[in-house]
Image (cartoon, rainbow, N blue to C red):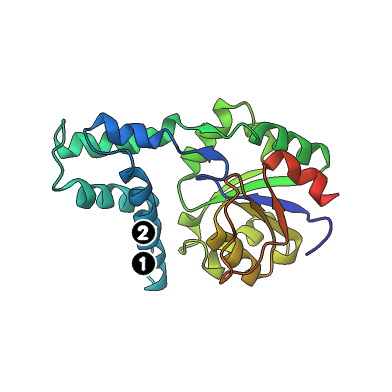
Amino acid sequence: MNPTPKVIVFDVNETLSDMSPMAGRFADVGVPEHLAALWFASLLRDGFALTAAGAPERFSTIGEGMLRVLLADMPLGPPIGEAVDHVMAGFAGLQLHPDVPAGVTALRQAGLRLVTLTNGSTEVADGLLTAAGLRQEFERLLSVDQASAWKPALAAYEYGAQECSVELAEMLLVAVHPWDIDGASRAGMGTAWINRTGRPYPDYFTTPQITVAALSDLAAALG
């Protein structure tokens, strides 16, 4: 890894955003909160599968479709269409993890360029960062919608590098998802894993070059 990467690339969903309130959206429509985690994991699985098949689809399209599958046999309060809309609307109200503002500020003070690269939409990333007063700290908000491939496909990371006019080796991917860390590493990027939960890293994925418990620790870890 370049000891002083030129660009820090952030994943958005779960890395920057605290998605725990999404469970409450499931409860609102009359189903168990634990289904939120199953839904998000299934959404990612199908997004990866479509990318592997050469037919990537938008995050929101898969999210809505998977909700209709998951909720089809559930005793919902509202009609299923309203339930789907209510859950998906939860993305617009998410907030940053508490460690993110200090971490972003420290990285910018170190003179680093910051961008996001999400499998979701740039609109969600923009709303999240604008609400927190941090939008101005990010040079670009990027989505794989323009890359025609979801992360962890190589094309997604190459798109990020092209948009930032740097080499992949000059970028550091920051994420909570081991699959994203692995994909970025295989693409030739530096990697930093945020392990807020204290769980072990899967040994079948490429080991992250940096591991921190909070984003606020990353600037110091980079030296």
Residues at marks 1 and 2 touching, judged by CB atoms closer than 8 Å:
yes
**Spatial distance from mark 1 to mark 2, Cα to Cα?**
7 Å
Quadrant housing residue 82: top left
Quarter of the image for the N terminus: give it.
bottom right
* Position of 96 relative to 53 (above/below): above
Q: Earlier in the sequence, mark 1 or mark 2?
A: 1
Which element carries disc 1, helix, strand or loop? Answer: helix
Q: How packed is label 1: few (under 14 Cα within 10 Å), some, or many (20 or more)?
A: some
User: Is 221 on the left or on the right of 87, as rendered?
Assistant: right
Q: How packed is label 2: few (under 14 Cα within 10 Å), some, or many (20 or more)?
A: some
- Residue 50, labelled with which disc? 1
* Position of 49 relative to 116 (above/below): below
**Considering depth in this image, is 40 or 108 the residue closer to the camera?**
40
- Residue 57, labelled with which disc? 2
Q: Residue at x 73, y 52 (%)?
A: 7
Where residue 193 sits in the image (x, y, percent)? 65, 54
Return the residue found at the far front: 199
User: Is 193 on the left or on the right of 66, as rendered?
Assistant: right
Where residue 35 sits in the image (x, y, percent)? 31, 45
Which element carries disc 2, helix, strand or loop? Answer: loop
Residue type indicated by callout 1: Leu
Where residue 23 sits in the image (x, y, percent)? 36, 36
Quadrant housing residue 36: top left
Q: Residue at x 82, y 36 (%)?
A: 109
User: Is 155 on the left or on the right of 62, as rendered?
Assistant: right
- Residue 210, labelled with which disc? none
Where residue 77 sits in the image (x, y, percent)? 16, 31
Q: Residue at x 53, y 38 (%)?
A: 17
